[in-house]
Every structure is written in C-alpha cells, then in structure tokens.
Amino acid sequence: MALESSEPSEPNESNESTDPTEPSDPIETTQQRTDNPLLQTENLVKRFGQFTATDRIDLTIERGEFRSVIGPNGAGKTTLFNLITGALPVTEGAIYFDGADITTLSPSARVRRGIGRSFQISNVFGGLTVRENVRLAIQSVARDEYTAVESLFKPTDRYDELNDRTEAILDRIGLAHVAAEQANALAYGDKRRLEIGVVLATDPELVLFDEPTAGMSVEETRETIDLLEAVLVDQTLLLIEHDIELVMELSDRITVLNGGQILAEGTPAEIAANQDVQNAYLGGMTE
Amino acid sequence: MASELLQLLVDGLTIGVVYVLLAAGLSVIFGVMNVINFAHGELFALGAYFALALIAPFGGSAFFVALFVAPLLVGIIGVGIERFTVRPLYGRNPLYHILLTFGLVLVINDLIYLIWEPGSVTLPLPEMLSGSIAVLDVTASVYNLFIIVLGALMAIAVWAMFEFTKYGLIVRAGAQDRQMVRNLGIDIDRYYSLVFGMGAALAAFAGIILGGYQTVNPTMGMSVIIPAFVIVVLGGLGSFRGAVVGGLFVGLVQTALRMYAPIFEGTGIFLLMIGVLLVRPHGLFGTDAAEEHTGDLLSGPRGGFLDSQTRTRLGLAMVGLLALVPLGAGTLYSTYAVTLVIEIIIWGLFALSLDFVMGYTGLVSLGHALFYGLGAYTVALGLSHVSQSAFVVIGLAIVLSAVIAWGIGFLSIRVSGVYFAMITLGFAELFYNMLGQLDITGGSDGLFGLSTYYGLAGIGVELDEIAVFLGPVAITGQSLFYYIALSALVASFLLTRRMLNSPFGAVLKSIRENEQRATFIGYETTVYKRRAFVVSGALAGLAGGLFTLNAGYATPSLVDWLNSGEVIVMVILGGMGTLYGPIIGSGIFFGLEELLTGFTDRWRLVLGTIFVLFVILLPGGLVSLPSRLAPALPGTPGRGPNSEPEPKPESNPDPEPATDVDDAHTRGDD
Amino acid sequence: MSADPLLSVDSVDAGYGDTQVLCDLSLSVEAGEIVSLVGRNGAGKTTTLRTIMGILQPTSGHVTYDGTDISALDATETAQQGLALVPEERRIFPDLTVTENLELAAHGGTADGDSLSVAEVLEMFENLRERAGNAGSSLSGGEQQMLAIARALVSGADVVLLDEPTEGLAPYIVRDVMDIVAALNDRGITVLLVEQNVQVCLELADRNYLVDQGQIVYEGTAAELGANEDVLDRYLGVTV
C-alpha cells in the first residue's frame, strides 16, 4: 500500500472519469471483494505419519481483520501457518485466498498473490545491505514491469522507480540512515524493523506473523507492536502469539487451537469468558 | 539359454561383490561423517599393490596371507588419513572434502607410480584357486566362485558387525544423529577413525580380489571410483543395505549389458542412476536424514580487503600485462609461454563459469566438464559439417551448451546438495561414454584435423595465414588466437559481473544468503538457479569451444571426471563467489603444474599435497589471503573459517518439532 | 542445604555467534531437587541447558558440577560426568529399535555402575516394553518422550536436564510424563526442568526460576510462584 501512495496514479478517479459507461465497475469490484473473505480454509488436514497436526480446520479471515491464533504448545499453530504459506503441502482440504483456490500454489506464488510472511529476527539476508534486502522484495513484486534483458543486465542502481520505492519503505520503517549497512550488523530492534520492512515491500494483503515478540522484553514487545500497527495499517494480519494479554488487546478476533482443531473462536471478550479455553491453556491439568 | 544366464550370474556377481565391498565403505563413511571420499578408489588400488608386494617374495601361496594383511595395512593408512586430513574439516561443507580427497587421489596415485611399475601386473594366485569347475553346462573359474563366496561372507560379516556389535550400534546411531550420540556421553569422534579405517580396509580387500580376477594397474582406482559412487547414490547415501543391493545390481546390469547390449555398457549404469534419482531423489534406500545441513561454503572475499577501485585497477593492470605476453614470445622466452597462458585463460573461463553457479547459488556441479566437452565437440562437428567459420561454430557451442544446461538443470535442480553433485557427475559420465561409442563423434579417438577460418560468409582468414607486425615483433597464428581467448575471457567476466549487479544477480545472492527467505519474498528459487546454471553451462561451452578452435581436436578425455574435479579445485583455490578468484586459481594451478613438472616427475604428488594443505589451512581461497593476513586492519571483519555447524539459537521458536520445515530450523542461524 | 549445590551455574554468558542469549545467568540445583526454569519462548531456557551440557561453551562464567568446574567440557565429557540431556525434540534414533536406543545409551553416560540395565528400565516402562522391537520412528510423541527419559536412566545419570518434556503431548500423557519425572526424582535423580506449561512446574518442582532475556528474574517455590500473579502475568503472559 505504501507503494501505491508513493505513485502518482489515482486509479479510482481516472477510472470513473474515463469510463463513464461503466460507472458501477469499481463499486462492483469492491462488492465482490467484500463478499469473499480474504482467506478461507476448508476442512484443512495435515498429517505427519499417524500424527494429525491439523485436524479439519475451517478458518475464515475477513479483509482488514486482525486475527490471532493462540493455543498451547503443540496445538498446531505453526503447522497451520506453514500450510497457509505453502511451506508444507496439505494432506486434505483446500485454502482459498481472495476467492481463488491456492491449495497447490508454491510459497513464492502465494507471496506474489499477496500473502506475506514475517520470520524471526535472524531471517533477513544477513550478508546483504539493508537497502538490498528491501529492494529484493520490491523487485520481486515489480518483476513484470521489466523485460528479461533489463532484469539480466541492467544494474540494480539504475532502476529509478524501484529505488524510489525502496527508499520510501526505508523511510517508513525508519532505516534510511543505515541503508548501506550490512543487515548482520544491525542492532536487534533494527533487524526487527528490517524484517517487517521486507514483508511490507512485497506489498501483501495478508501478513502472517509467527510470534513476532518472542524473546523480547515487555518494552521491546510494546515497540514492535506499535511498529506493526503503524506500518501495516492497510493489511490484514494473522498472528501466532504466546502472550495472551497482547493478543487480547490487539486482536479483532481470536482463534484458539488445541490438538490440531479449532477449540473456540470469537472476540477477545468471548474468548476470555470461554471455559474450554481456560482449561486448554492450563494444559488440561484440571481434567 | 539357462547356462548363459548362469554364466551371466557368475560373472555379474563376481563384479557385483567387488562393488558391494567398495561401495559399503564409501557409503558408511558418508553416512557417518558426511565425507565424500574420492580417494576411496586409490585405497582400493593400494590394497592390490600391497598384496602384490606381500606375495612377490613368497609366490602365489602367500595370497591368503596378503588377503588379510594388506587390507589391515591400508586400514591403518585410512585411520591416518582420517586423523590428520579429514578430521580438521568436520563441520564444513562436504565440498571441501571433495577437494581434500581429490588431492589425496593425486598423492596416492602418484605414490603408486613412484613405488611400483607403471604397467599392468598379474597378481600371483595360489594353485588351488586356478582352474575351473563345470557345473551343469557352465564352467566357472574357481577364482570367480571364491570371490563370490568370500565377498558375500565379508559383506555378511560387515553387516553382522553393524547389526550386532556395540561398535556397529554406535556407528549406526552416529549416522542418524551425531550430536545426540555425543549427548549420551559417547565420544563419536573416536569412532570416525575406525569407520574410515574399516572402509579403507574393505576397499583394499575389494582391490585385491579384483586384482586377482583382472590385473593390477595404477589406474584401477580411477576406473572403479565412479561406478562406486553411482552405486552409493543409487542405493542411497549412507545406507549399507543400499550399497549391497546397488552393488550386486550394478554388477549384474553391467555384465548383462556387455553380453546383450554392448552399446549401453558404458552408459547404462548412469542412465539407471539418473532415472532412479529423478524418481527417488534420495536413492533407493536413502532418507533425507542423511543429508544434513553442514557448514556453509566459504565464498566471496570475506571482508573486502581491497576496495573496489583498487581491485578494478589491479584487474586492468592484469589484463594489460596479459596482453603483453605474446610480444615477448620467441625472444624473451619460448613461444611455449603463449601456449601455457592460453591454457590458463581457457581454463580460467571454464572455472569462472563454474563459479557463477557454485559460488553464487551454492549448486556444486561435479560434471561441469560435460559442458566443456559439449562446446569442444560442437565446434569440432560444426567445423566439419556446418561451417568453417569460427564465429558460427562458437555461437553454436554456446547455444547448444545453454540448451543442454537448461535440460539438465530442469531434471536435476530439484535434487539438492550432494545428490545434485552426483547427478551432474552422472550426466557427464553418460556423455563421456557416449562420446567414446558414437561414430559421429569419432569414438574414443575423438575428432581431429580441423581447420578454421575467422570470418563469416566466406570472408575471413585462417589465423596461420596472417602476421601482424608491431615494429620488430611479429604476431602470428597462436598469438592472435591468444588475443581472441583473452577477449573472450574479459568479455565473459564483464558480462557475468554485470549480471550479478542486475536484479537477476541480486536474487542469486539472496539465494546464497538464505534460500528460504528468498522463496518467501516471492522468488521461485529453482527457476533462478536453473537460469544461473544455463549461463554457467553456456560459458563452459564457450571455454570448450575455444579449446577446440585452438587445438584443432576434441577427444572424450575432455569430459573425464578428473577435469570436473580440477575445475572445482581451481575455483576453490582462487576463491569462490568472486568471479576473478577462479581465474587466479587457474593461473596458480597451471603455474604450479608447470613449475613442478620442471623439477620432478612426481609433480602430482606435490600438487596433491599442496591441495590437501590448502583446503585445511586456507579454505576461503587465495583471495581470502590478504584479509587472513591482516585481521587487525579496519574494515576487515575477521570471519574465521570455522562456521559453527551445530547451534540453533533458541530465538527460533518452533514449538512443534514434528511439524517444522527442516529448512526453517537449520537455516535460522546463519 | 548449606553444603555446596550439586549443580551450579555462575554468572554465565553464552550465545550463538554474535548473538548473546544468556547474560550473567546464575542458578543452582541441590542434590535430589526438581528445579524448573520457566519463561517465554526465546528467553534462554534451552540455551541454559545446552550450556550446562557443554553443547555450547559459556563465553564467561562457570558451570560447576559436584565441586568440579565443567564449563570447558564438551557434551560427551559432560555426559560422562553424570549429566543427561533430554532435548526438546527428544531425538530418538529413528532407525534404531527401542531396545537399541536404550543399549546405545547404556554404552554412554557414566561408568560408575549404578545405572539401571536395559531390562530393568523396560520393566519400568510398560508401553516401551510392548514396543521394544519397534523402530524409534514408529513411536508416538508420548512414547518417544518416555524413551528419551528412559535413555537418561540407563545412562546412569545423576542429573537429568529435561527440555519441555510435555510439549505437544495430549493431557493424559502429560500426566504420565509427570509421574515418570516424579518417579525419577524418587530414585534420587536430580532434575532440572524447562517447561512452558507453568502448571506442570508448579506441581512438580521444588523451586522455580523465571528466565527472561537470558537472566534469572525471579526465584521461588511453587507456592510462592503460584501466588505471584504479577510475575506470572508479566513474564509468562498467563494467569493461573
């Protein structure tokens, strides 16, 4: 979204003025967009040998939502993420993104459709500069704008538009001043910013976060969350998190997994009041 | 018919048993230590020669003694090799073991030449093993049956040792999870020497029995190592069962092909291996557990000791200096200097082509000589059948190499790591054997007597016809070609450098840094690796084409796996992931060879020793030397050669061990 | 409790490459105790166990066991001193049978002869006995955990470092694992337990350490920790 704001075009207005014959078109599209949930899984199953890690999950995430997935260790949160991003093949069931079946798409094809994934801190290209990290992500989304010859032979520093977009992202995540540094050399918090910047640069509609605050102090957690909220305003977010308090505060809706199944789903208030959830989170010790 | 099949069975099993013994050690050494031991073939040969030496004073009856003493001695040598050369490299990428053991091949092989006669010798056998017995309609030599029975007993003994002894249990566990064995308080490193020694002894044993069946000669190691690797890969790296099944299978298939379809005798097993790997990327009995992520390749100059401006100046100075070489030929030094530097330039280009794919995407191609040979043969065939124009045939060589590289890349890039190396080796050996068999390629003699003219559509010259006079200096044929080769090298260097600075190159670098992350910002990494492989293949084809243009011939030996090995040596020698390092590597390689042949006939011994020391002491290549020498200087972060293989930081929370993507786990910390 | 602790970690710094995970971490475990380390993901719990075990060497500080400084020992040597690590991923040898897994462990560990034999251990673990000839890879998660603990037993360890033993297990199996840990302790084995499941710690452990950012931020008995909602909330994000 940041990319579009930095571009001069105003697609909606031009559409309406140049195409008076079809004034309803943009509206219809929006209509359709709201009809389809952004992400939907149907009867999703993942088995490892005899072990069922994901057990018939039906998950629906609406556009613009902030959804969190919580659950005790081993509940199947990471597996669910890996299925959605395509890191693991599904055993049964289907995944729809924006109405289209993406069940068999490769991870990179899903990224290009708009599913971004944030990794843990160390997962940037450590040996490349901060700028190169961001530019790689920009370049990935913009690759169709250039010919094969250009992408093979034209030096990266001569793509003005890509570089402008890169700088815009760098500004937005507050790393413009260290753009020429190696990513490995960044301080902890800055690496975190870069990680988010790289995801943002792929222009995702949906961003998946796997415990973005793991290992952080209360203050760092706060900062990271503030950054996420500030930078990813237009995105739909799906978060795995251990910290229940954080989840309660941030989420629009919460899905609780247990034993690979959805145990409960609802608003934070509903989840807080749910007795099953209380039990599951305490490891079923009361049974 | 039945007797024929029986005959096939006897002959096939004889060879099969030898293969089993050879492959078992190789496979277990890989499974437990992650070491790809190219020197295994030489240990095999050493076994036969030790036996020869032991039998000679006493005559054939000493055979039985030698059969057990010689493997013991070779086993001790194996222990020594493990202790002093392999051990310092644990935790590094298996590629370094390839380089190390390649050096050991040179050393051991040259020692054999140094100590024993260069020709073939017959191993004296005791009388009771000579002669033959007839069963039904089949006459089998006693020795064949002896080999089969003894080999089978030996294989069973080894299997039983793995299965039922404490030692075997520990080794098997080590092949599955080394660190956990350590956590249990077992010093697994102590067992490595034994495993290596045992593998060496088995190889020696196999060498003796094959030596008795055929002859003992210094190239016997070279001729079995590739089939042995095929068997190991076919059966699954690290799998003893795979080695047994694969060994017998390949022995029988080879024998059957020789009897019924001799045209496929050389190629059959490679087709088999490629076919199996495409269907089962980890071999028949392999699991992906055998292939664990070990240390990274050390690529790039690591810290950039010289700034880019200095490097550019140095590069320009180098090119300028090279441009002067032909001017002094015949006066300051012999014209041979020009020939030598042409060789350096062509191989420098070949090494550069390999670096583009190996140093930037981490794909280790062990069969790159395929493209070199393909370029050479395309030029040779093109000159005889298509056009006499050097430019046309070189163009053809580049295009055809690129197309074949795409095809091979399409089939092989889905398999990773060591298996990729092996499948490319398989393709190269397949091509090698095809060249020797097809009439159009001139069989094992190759194609020669080619003449070229430099021009298009009938307008042009033959190099020998012209001379350019620069004052007193005449530049003729060979020297003119020198400038053509130098231009090709410089142009290729500039082209690949340009590509690496493009968006395409940025993606290659990102793959080298962190392939998983590259996937999750939207790149189909296999597509990019394949493209890099195509570029690399095309450049290797150019190098091979230049060779034939200059030399006027092409022979199958251009595709010999030793060439694939040597080019890897050059890349690592100079420094991987730099583009210019491999060119320097080529210079050093041929320079050393030239220097050493001047001093001693045993130059390969010295060269091999240098590789061994080099890979242990300076794995980052010569280009890393400045930053190694000056760690205190600012701007040179002294990144040591020992990247930690084991630790996974806890900040990589993966609360569901059964569910994690293996990559996510292991790549997390680099 | 005035004697020297059996195991103590003093002001240890440790990490991976450039990343420091443990900062000046200290803790001690008395003979016969069950001590737990709790904390969020990434706090440094597993790193603490790895450092004690010698898989990771501390960059400063000391690990002392039974009066001996074991900071410089590697994993093999540490195991030979009588410490056993049951790692989070369990790391059962997948192609070895249950019996072979145990026999292997019997070859390792201490040589002081007070360890249980494979047969004795199989006697203790009924479900393993039934599957003695099966390959490690065919075991369920719970069975693998049992086997991992059983391995520590046959190795003759005096101290067992347990990393998240209940992770990913069904509640009734969690109960079994807890019983086993308690049984270990009854045999005189000292346990250092890393757990995310606070309830397990509160029930099993004599004392609990709370780890955050590579440091110990709280120490207390189960009763103290259970009653300290502020600490639980702040560092673990759970309310009991």
Image: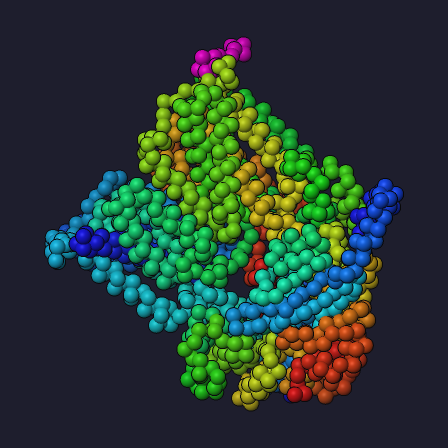
Residue at 70% across, 86% down: C222
Relative to residue A248, is residue B527 depicted above or below?
above
* Percent of width and height locating residue A269: 81, 77
* Percent of width and height locating residue B72: 29, 59
* Side of C141 relative to B339 (left or right): right
In the rendered image, residue B436 lying in the magenta stretch gets the answer no
Colour mapping used in the image: rainbow
Please identify the quarter of the rendering in which residue A244 is found.
bottom right
Q: How many marks?
A: 0
Relative to residue B654, is residue C113 depicted above or below?
below
Q: Is residue B190 visible?
A: yes
Q: Nearer the viewer, residue B539 or C53?
A: B539
Residue at 26% across, 49% down: B255
Determine the residue located farthest toward the bottom in the rendered image. C186
* Side of B401 relative to C210 (left or right): left
Residue range of the region highlighted in magenta in the rendering: B460-472
Q: Nearer the viewer, residue C4 or A225?
A: A225
Residue at 58% across, 66% down: A92
* Percent of width and height locating residue C88: 58, 72
Determine the residue located farthest toward the front in the rendered image. A21
Q: Nearer the viewer, residue B609 or B134?
A: B134
Residue at 72% across, 76% down: A264
Relative to residue C97, is residue C222 depicted above or below?
below
* Percent of width and height locating residue C10: 66, 73
Relative to residue A69, is residue C131 depicted above or below?
below
Q: Is residue A216 visible?
A: no
* Side of B552 relative to A145 (left or right): left
Quadrant of image for the C terminus of chain B: bottom right
In the rendered image, residue B465 lying in the magenta stretch gets the answer yes
